[in-house]
Image: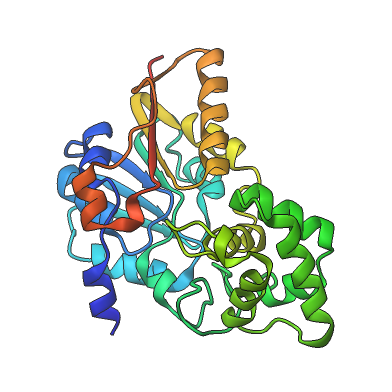
Amino acid sequence: MRGKTVAEHVSVMLNEVLEALPLQPGAIVVDGTLGLGGHSAAICQKIAPGGQILGFDWDSSMLELGKARLAGFESVSQHFFNEDYRAISLRVEELNLRGKINGILMDLGLNNAQIEDSARGISFRTEGPLDMRMDRQSGEPAAAYLNRESQARLEKAIWEYGDENWAKKIAQVIVQRRKDHPFRTTSDLVDAVAEAIPPAKRDKRIHFATRTFQAIRIAVNHELDDLEGAVRDAARCLAIDGVIVTLSYHSGEDRAVKHAFRELRQEGGFKELFDKPQTPTQAEINANSKSRSAKMRALRRTT
């Protein structure tokens, strides 16, 4: 089953990422979200022999799958960290690689293995426990968050992290429902959203629970906490002509990256590769619908 999941995973905007990063034999590259290793495997092909790859992932099970995928690249030195991209600067410093990094990829999305694992409760399409944590060894699961958070803060999270116009009503229904039936499973949350949003008012393009599930997942994992600072700190690890590439899938993520890149440009010594974010081709969207919301930004260190 694991093998099938890895085989079905498709890395988002792979060709665009490979073109933006300065990859050649001997290059040192950081993958801030290793996942199943799709991007990193393609990167290793280009930096072998003699290259180095630093892989980060706060999901230990994904880290192990990613490491297994890269095991065949024996001529590439590999370092792995069970941490998220916010630890990039610290670990680069420990390895004495500051100012020597040629490329950094920060893919801020999930992969299919995480989404389709019913035990994680990330997807509204399968029944499972409302967990949603990337690191299931720490923090509180989504069910606990929904059962204790105030209505005002739930509304704020659903609005800010999900861009959900029905955030106020959804938060109200969640608080009402949990009094008699505490949230435990994905269907509990789907049912609450269904009660809050009238059928006639639902977005026909996506499932009515999509934005709420996204928002709760972001809140539970604190995904946007200091993202802007993490991008800045990582970019400052680059060598001259080194490039940092980000893939974001939510307006909050893209906004944080945009602000970080702008601050770095204003400091001097950095230049964006594109005037506006790059997006997947229609052919890629047709082949992998989960790529449709992706936005790619890239920044080069010039001095």
Evaluate whether residue 22 shows in this view.
Answer: no
Q: How many marks?
A: 0
Residue 248 placed where, x, y %? 45, 44
In the picture, the quarter occupied by the N terminus is: bottom left
Report whether 294 appears left or right of 159.
Answer: left
Q: Is residue 293 visible?
A: yes
Which image quarter: residue 168?
Answer: bottom right
Residue at image location 61% in from the left, 48% down from the top: 224
Residue 166 point in image, percent of width and height: 67, 56
Q: Quick one: which residue is furthest to the front in this view?
A: 200
Image position of 136 with respect to 297: above or below? below
Please tell me which residue lies in front, 185 or 210.
210
| Depth check, front residue: 24 or 282 | 282
Question: What residue is drawn where x is 30% and y is 51%?
Answer: 12
Query: Is residue 103 depicted above or below 213 in this figure?
Result: above
Where is residue 36 shown, x and y percent of the image? 32, 64
Q: Looking at the picture, how far across and down is residue 54, in whole percent?
A: 37, 50
Specify how the rendered protein is coloured: rainbow
Horizontal relation, residue 44 to residue 263: left or right: left
Picture quadrant of residue 213: bottom right
Quarter of the figure that contains the C terminus: top left
Q: Is residue 269 above or below residue 54?
A: above
Q: Nearer the viewer, residue 8 or 59?
A: 8
Residue under the point 15% across and 49% down? 45
Q: Name the side, left or right, on which 14 lies relative to 158.
A: left
**Image quarter for residue 28?**
top left
